[in-house]
Amino acid sequence: MTMLTLEGWRETPGSDAPQPLEQIRFHVSRRCHQALQEAGEELLRTGDPERFIDVNPDELALEMPPEVGPIADYRFRVYLGKSDDRTQFHLVGHSARHSSLVYTNPTLVVLLLS
């Protein structure tokens, strides 16, 4: 299992630009890591722009900044880098308090320990 701490962003309805969030922490299990790798391979085969992977909340152990609070729905968005086709992912979801879109900065799947 790999623990990640990434900067995040929040897009509130009616806002002109995303607002930065403090760090978002979560775990990526081996099973989830494998699913991320497989999603990247599938994107290379199909040419699709992205895939979404559902997340098991118990495995994720998500820690959100206090100003966001709990997340109502979240999953990993997986896509290929524009210049190098390397598989990237980030966590996306919506705040249960105010329905704002919340997401992390992306990271490369290859940086996760297998």
Image: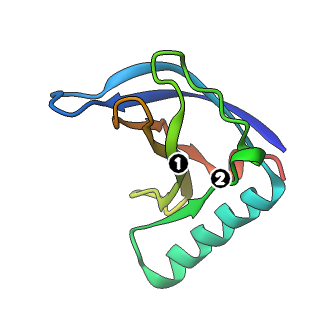
Horizontal and vertical percent position of residue 30: 82, 56
Image quarter of residue 100: top left
x, y percentage for residue 41? 61, 74
Mark 1 residue type: Tyr
Could you classify mark 1 by the number of other residues whose Cα lies within 10 Å: few (under 14), some (14-19), or many (20 or more)?
A: many
Query: Most extreme residue toward the front, as rendered?
Result: 97
User: How many dots with numbers?
Assistant: 2
Estimate how packed mark 2 is, as few (under 14), some (14 to 19) or many (20 or more) residues with alpha carbons within 10 Å.
some
Q: Which residue is mark 2?
A: 109
Residue 18, located in which quarter of the rendered image? Answer: top left
Query: In the image, residue 61 lies at what x, y percent?
Result: 73, 37
Q: Quadrant of residue 96?
A: top left
Q: Secondary structure at mark 1?
A: strand
Q: Are marks 1 and 2 in contact (CB under 8 Å)?
A: no
Q: Is residue 111 left or right of residue 20?
A: right
- The residue that appears at 54% across and 31% down in the rendered structure is 70
Q: 45 or 38: which is nearer to us?
A: 38
Horizontally, residue 25 falls left or right of residue 104, namely: right
Where is 79 relative to 89, above or below? Answer: below
Relative depth, front residue between 27 and 100: 100
Which x, y percent locates residue 47?
42, 79
For residue 74, the mark is 1
Is 65 situated above or below 29? above
The Cα–Cα distance between marks 1 and 2, rounded to whole angstroms, is 18 Å
Say above or below: 38 vs 102. below
Closer to viewer: mark 1 or mark 2: 1
